[in-house]
Every structure is written in structure tokens, then in C-alpha cells.
Image (cartoon, grey):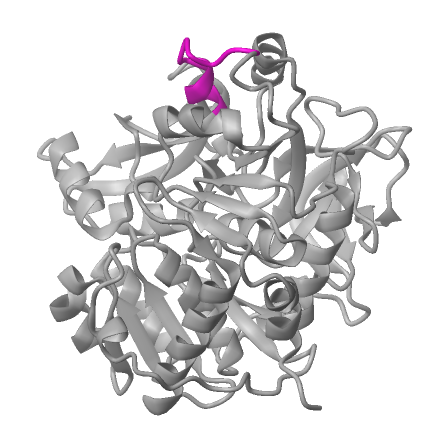
């Protein structure tokens, strides 16, 4: 073994075409593939000189920037395991991840270094700001490192995905998990080096970090790199771009802007949506306004992308399409695989499926079968043509604006507030976010106020997890076994935001 499996494949196009533009950010000079790869190898030298060894974790909680993308490539090149963390996580949330993953290096925003350093234990702490400044880039020198040899099965990243018990799970993704999925999508979505991809997604999430970035790298596409999503910036980019990847919220907000027209979208070849279900009404409005049919797909942190509506062929609103090439999918009931048209739990198997949960062998055994089938926990149905529709989630997962929220974590926090007897957290339809987090709270006495609950949740939870509405009720609906009936709550408050 003489190569670094993932880095060599992600870097292949850039090595052959170093002058090609990799990224264009507003109000900045274009950055070439050659410069991006060279910058990554310089950063890799900083990591190795700071003591990073193959297999060590690099935990990163920084604002979106091209340097942050280069840090991902640098970690892979140095043989490390990249651990991106949502920038909205509070100190109490961050403490769990750092304690569980025991990273060798932590990179944080300069404004948070005093807060993060005590949580980092023995890890070396660097800073990196959105403008590329910080102690990480100050440590750069002329030194570069040759990519450290790593195999297809070696870990490249750990991404945390919340569990229903409130304890987050670290999904271990190998070099081949990431590369094989990018290579598959390159062919399926017909990406080439003529594409310009509007990158308005966060890069602490599999969608923006792996689907968008890895796909651009392996195909030689150019990123129109936006630090965050804004309808104005995306609309300005449309005439010179060819692809947009987004979540349903992107599309509902763009539809609200009268500047979205068929002429403005004329140069585009593909609009992709994922991370949350899209309403059929949004599909229809988009097609009427732009002449384009949005392509929906289905993936998970643990599996990368599993299914996609076809690039050429019928894209069916309300479905997530067909299993991707190389991905096996089945829908299972208690007695085995269900008949066509029946609802069951989606299971997938393929090179895209992760290696298990970090330091959680029991949880891995529960969800990853010995023969490689991963039990997604999503409920789905397959039609006569093989198209998959997601009809529910067996674990009460809420997907709001493309981010996963597990009710148990929010409930546990609220239940500990003085004056709270119990709570139930649900997701209800929301025209902008797809789903909104709603907390239904039963007070133990009359002293409890909405402001008291909001004060705790805003301090302890990332913004996307915070309830958008809090209801105070005298009791929660229960069945004869005493179990809270969340389905009844969702039905009762289904029109809260619509």
C-alpha cells in the first residue's frame, strides 16, 4: 500500500488540471484546484507537526470557508479522521462530542477558544475564523506532507447523529464509503468539469461536506461557494451556474422571491433537494415558475446517498426515486420482506454503508446486520416501478430545515426545568422548514412560564433544535398502556404553522 485511498481519488482531477477553477466565492479571486490541493497539504503538515497520527480524530467547529474545506482534505491526507461539528452546538453539547471522540486536535472559531479549550482535554487546540485567519493558518510554513497511506477500509470521518435516548452516535465512514458514493453520483447525475455547482449548504453536514464537495472534486466541477444560503445570493448565481443542491427550505424561500423566473434559471441543468421531504405543492410551483423538475433523493449520515429520482426519466414528486447503482434496498416487516405497496422499515446495503457507531458495539449490532444490511428506521413503501416513498420515521425523528432533531434530547432538557411535570416534543408541518419542533409541556404548578422554558432551551440547545412553539397543557394523551400518543398530538397540531 503506497497511496492514501480517498485523497488520491479526490485529488486526481486537480492534479491533472491544476489551473482549473475549483471555487469562486463572492468578492474573492477564483481559487484553482492546484492551489486548493497545495493548501491542503500545507495544512496537513501543520496537523502532523502538532502530533496527529494516522487514525487520530480532528474535531472541527468553525464557520464555513474554503480553508475549512481544505482542512477536511488535509485531515484525510494526513491519515486522520475528520469530525465536523455543527456551529450551533452549545458548550454543553460540544463537551459530549469531545469527551466521546477524544480528538487529538480541536479546531474552533477564534471567538470561542476560551470556551472550547477547557473542554478539549489533552487535545491541541487551534483556531480558524471565517476569513481564514487564526492560529491554524498562522502555523503554516513552506512544509508539506506526502499523503499518508490509507486503505479503502480505513476511517475518513466520524459524523455524529443523535439517538432517541438523547445520546449522540458517531457514524464511522471509511475512505471507500465516501469515494464510492461520490463516484456513483457523478455518473448518475451526469456531473462533468463543465458544471458550476452553487454551494450554499453548511459543511458540518454530510449533504454539504460529502455529497456536494466530494462530487465536485471527483468530477472537476467548479463551486460557486456561498458562506450561507440567501435567496438573493443564489438568484444572482443562477445565470452562470448549472446545478443547485439544497433542502426544501431553499426552494420555498426562492419561490417567495419574484426574481425567480424561467429566464433566470435558463442556464441551469439540475436542481436537487434532500435532507427533508419536499411537499408536492413545492414541486409543482417550482416546475411552473422555472420549467425545471426538482430531483429528490434520499440519504443518511450513516449511508451517504441511497436513492435518487432519475436524471433522465420520470421524477416523481412525493418519492425519493430508485435505489442508486450498487445500493441494495429492501422494505422489511416483522415477518421479513413485505409485499410491493406495503409499508415497512427501509434497509440498505452497499459500499456506501458505514462501518458502525464509534465505541457503541451494542448499538451497531442493533442497527447493522452481520450480512451488511443497515436498518434505517425510516418507514417506506415501494411502488410497482421501484420508486421509494418515505412515509414516516420509526423513531420520531424531526427533520427541520434539513437538520435532524430527536425529541428525547429536547424532552430531557425541558423535563429538568423547575415547574415541569413532563413534556412531549413533536414535529409538525411547516411551510418553510418542512417540519417545526413543537414542545407540549405539562406544568407541575402554576409558576411555570413559557419564558422560563425558552430561556433554558435557547442556552442549552442549538437554534435548529429549539422549539418554534411551546404549548402548555394539563395532560398528555395516553393509550391504555400509559404510553404518550405523539401521533394524536401531531394530528391535533398539524395546522399550527399552515
Q: Is residue 261 magenta?
A: yes
Task: Answer left or right for 373 relative to 62.
Answer: right
Q: Is residue 377 above or below residue 36?
A: above
Residue closest to the eye, 414 or 29: 29
In the depicted structure, whether residue 23 falls above or below residue 189: below
Instruction: Give the x, y percent position of residue 224.
Output: 46, 41
Residue at (38% x, 31% y) in the render? 476
Residue 312 placed where, x, y %? 81, 30
- Drawn side of residue 366 relative to residue 443, left or right: right
Q: Name which residue lies at 73% across and 37% down.
A: 380
> Left or right of 467: which side holds 281?
right
Residue 430 found in image quarter: top left
Whether residue 477 is visible here, answered yes or no, is no
Q: Report the quarter where the C terminus lies.
A: top left
Total labels drawn: 0
Q: Residue furthest front?
A: 19
Quadrant in the picture for residue 451? top left
Q: 245 or 410: nearer the eye?
A: 245
From this viewpoint, is residue 146 visible?
A: yes
| The furthest residue to the left | 447
Residue stretch rendered in magenta on the structure: 251-262
Q: Is residue 368 magenta?
A: no
Quadrant of the drawing holding the N terminus? bottom right
Q: Nearer the viewer, residue 449 or 300?
A: 300
Q: Residue at x 62, y 12 (%)?
A: 284
The picture places residue 330, in percent across and down from the top left corner, at 83, 48
Amino acid at each position: 500500500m503506497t497511496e492514501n485511498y480517498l485523497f488520491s481519488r479526490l485529488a486526481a482531477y486537480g492534479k491533472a488540471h491544476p489551473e482549473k477553477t475549483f471555487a469562486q466565492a463572492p468578492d474573492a479571486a477564483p481559487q484553482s484546484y492546484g492551489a486548493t490541493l497545495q493548501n491542503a497539504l500545507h495544512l496537513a503538515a501543520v496537523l502532523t507537526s502538532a502530533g496527529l497520527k494516522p487514525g487520530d480524530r480532528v474535531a472541527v467547529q468553525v464557520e464555513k470557508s474554503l480553508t475549512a474545506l481544505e482542512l477536511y482534505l488535509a485531515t484525510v491526507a494526513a491519515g486522520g479522521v475528520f469530525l465536523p461539528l455543527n456551529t450551533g452546538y452549545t458548550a454543553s453539547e460540544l463537551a459530549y462530542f469531545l469527551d466521546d471522540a477524544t480528538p487529538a486536535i480541536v479546531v474552533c472559531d477564534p471567538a470561542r477558544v476560551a470556551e472550547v479549550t477547557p473542554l478539549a482535554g489533552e487535545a491541541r487546540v487551534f483556531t480558524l475564523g471565517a476569513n481564514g485567519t487564526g492560529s491554524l493558518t498562522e502555523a503554516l510554513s513552506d512544509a508539506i506532507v506526502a499523503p499518508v497511506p490509507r486503505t479503502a477500509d480505513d476511517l475518513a470521518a466520524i459524523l455524529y447523529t443523535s439517538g432517541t435516548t438523547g445520546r449522540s452516535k458517531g457514524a464511522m465512514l471509511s475512505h471507500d464509503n465516501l469515494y464510492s458514493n461520490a463516484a456513483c453520483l457523478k455518473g448518475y447525475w451526469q456531473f462533468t468539469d463543465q458544471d458550476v455547482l452553487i454551494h450554499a449548504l453548511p459543511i458540518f453536514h454530510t449533504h454539504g461536506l460529502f455529497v456536494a464537495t466530494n462530487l465536485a472534486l471527483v468530477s472537476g466541477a467548479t463551486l460557486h461557494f456561498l458562506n450561507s444560503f440567501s435567496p438573493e445570493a443564489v438568484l444572482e448565481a443562477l445565470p452562470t451556474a448549472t446545478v443547485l443542491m439544497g433542502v426544501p427550505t431553499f426552494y420555498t424561500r426562492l419561490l417567495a422571491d419574484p426574481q425567480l423566473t424561467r429566464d433566470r434559471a435558463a442556464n441551469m441543468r439540475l436542481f436537487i433537494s434532500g435532507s427533508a421531504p419536499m411537499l408536492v405543492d413545492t414541486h409543482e410551483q417550482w416546475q411552473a415558475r422555472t420549467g425545471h423538475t426538482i430531483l429528490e433523493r434520499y440519504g443518511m449520515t450513516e449511508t451517504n446517498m441511497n436513492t435518487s429520482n432519475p436524471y433522465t426519466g420520470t421524477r416523481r414528486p412525493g418519492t425519493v426515486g430508485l435505489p442508486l447503482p450498487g445500493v441494495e434496498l429492501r422494505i422489511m416487516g416483522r415477518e421479513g420482506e413485505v409485499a410491493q405497496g406495503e409499508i415497512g422499515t427501509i434497509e440498505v446495503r452497499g459500499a456506501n454503508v458505514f462501518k458502525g457507531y464509534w465505541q457503541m458495539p451494542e448499538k451497531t449490532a442493533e442497527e447493522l446486520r452481520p450480512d451488511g444490511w443497515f436498518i434505517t428506521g425510516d418507514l417506506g413503501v415501494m411502488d410497482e416501478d421501484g420508486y421509494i416513498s418515505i412515509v414516516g420515521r420509526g423513531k420520531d425523528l424531526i427533520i427541520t430545515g434539513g437538520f435532524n432533531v430527536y425529541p428525547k434530547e429536547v424532552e430531557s432538557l425541558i423535563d429538568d426545568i423547575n415547574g415541569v411535570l413532563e413534556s412531549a416534543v413533536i414535529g409538525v408541518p411547516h411551510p418553510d422548514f418542512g417540519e417545526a419542533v413543537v414542545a407540549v409541556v405539562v406544568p407541575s404548578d402554576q409558576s411555570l412560564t413559557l419564558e422560563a422554558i425558552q430561556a433554558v432551551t435557547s442556552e442549552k440547545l442549538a437554534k435548529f433544535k429549539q422549539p418554534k412553539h411551546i404549548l402548555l397543557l394539563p395532560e398528555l394523551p395516553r393509550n391504555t398502556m400509559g404510553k404518550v400518543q405523539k401521533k394524536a398530538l401531531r394530528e391535533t397540531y398539524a395546522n399550527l404553522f399552515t
